[in-house]
Amino acid sequence: MSENRFLRNILNSTSESHSVLEDVQGIVTGAMLASLGVLVLKAGGLLTGGTAGLAFLLVYSTGIGFGLAFFTVNLPFYYFAWKRLGLAFTLKTFIAVGLTSVLTGIIPRFLSIGDTHPLAAGLFGGALVGTALLIFFRHSASLGGFGILALFLQDRFGFKAGYVQLGLDGMVLVLSFFVATPFIIACSIAGALVINLILAFNHRRDRYIAM
């Protein structure tokens, strides 16, 4: 009897919740698209906002791999995710970040992305990352980042989450002037706009309630 209930939880979904199997495929698919998007952005020499932007800064300034940098800079944010959004969201986010970090290191062994114009990298890389984030959000996960910290600070101290996010992303942008040209930064901003427009147009809780 308990085995049947366990199998139902894995396989069965409802109009308001995903099954475990659906969450697994969502996180795997999102990680595949996110890692490919990161590699396209990197091929164009671009940056982005959030913790991914911090990871890119570490990559360009130190030469370490993106996967290691991305996984490391996200570690402090899991505490805020747990406090603000719960254990299930935190575990899914940890898995999403870890899998994306691993795939960004593995994919170049099998798939080569040659010279890429920065603007094309921003548009196509941004579209891939934005779609990946959309999938993660719909499965109650994320790629970590400043948004979690912003929500935590809003709850704890009353700071507006949007202003906190804007300030943190602005700091990344200021730091990027030390490792990139104005043209590269402009193309990076274009990529960030694509990411956020995809989320703004396609992710609304009142339209998509399954979590």
Image: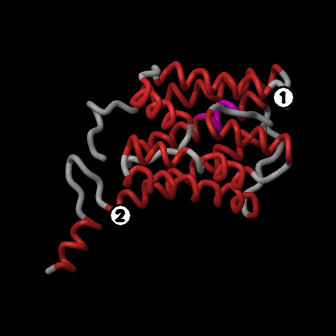
Q: Position of residue 102 (x, y in %)?
A: 65, 60
Few, some or many residues within 10 Å of mark 2 (<14, 14–19, 20+)? few
Q: Position of residue 204 (x, y in %)?
A: 34, 30
- Identify the element where label 2 is drawn: helix
User: Is 52 on the left or on the right of 45, as rendered?
Assistant: left
Q: Amino acid at mark 2?
A: Leu
Marker disc for residue 195: none
Name the image quarter holding the N terminus: bottom left
Q: Position of residue 68 (x, y in %)?
A: 71, 55
Residue drawn at (85%, 24%) of the image: 181
The relative height of residue 79 versus residue 116 in the rendered view (above or below) is: below
Residue ranking furthest to the front? 157
Residue drawn at (56%, 52%) of the image: 97
Residue stretch rendered in magenta on the structure: 122-126
Q: Is residue 125 magenta?
A: yes
Q: Which residue is mark 2?
A: 21
- The prevailing secondary structure element of the residues shown in magenta is helix
User: Is 29 on the left or on the right of 186, as rendered?
Assistant: left
The relative height of residue 167 versus residue 63 in the rendered view (above or below) is: above
Q: Which residue is mark 1?
A: 180
Residue ranking furthest to the left? 1
Q: Position of residue 162 (x, y in %)?
A: 49, 21
177 or 4: nearer the viewer: 177
Q: Is residue 197 magenta?
A: no
124 or 165: nearer the viewer: 165
Mark 1 vs mark 2: give the one in front: 1
Q: Amino acid at mark 1?
A: Ala
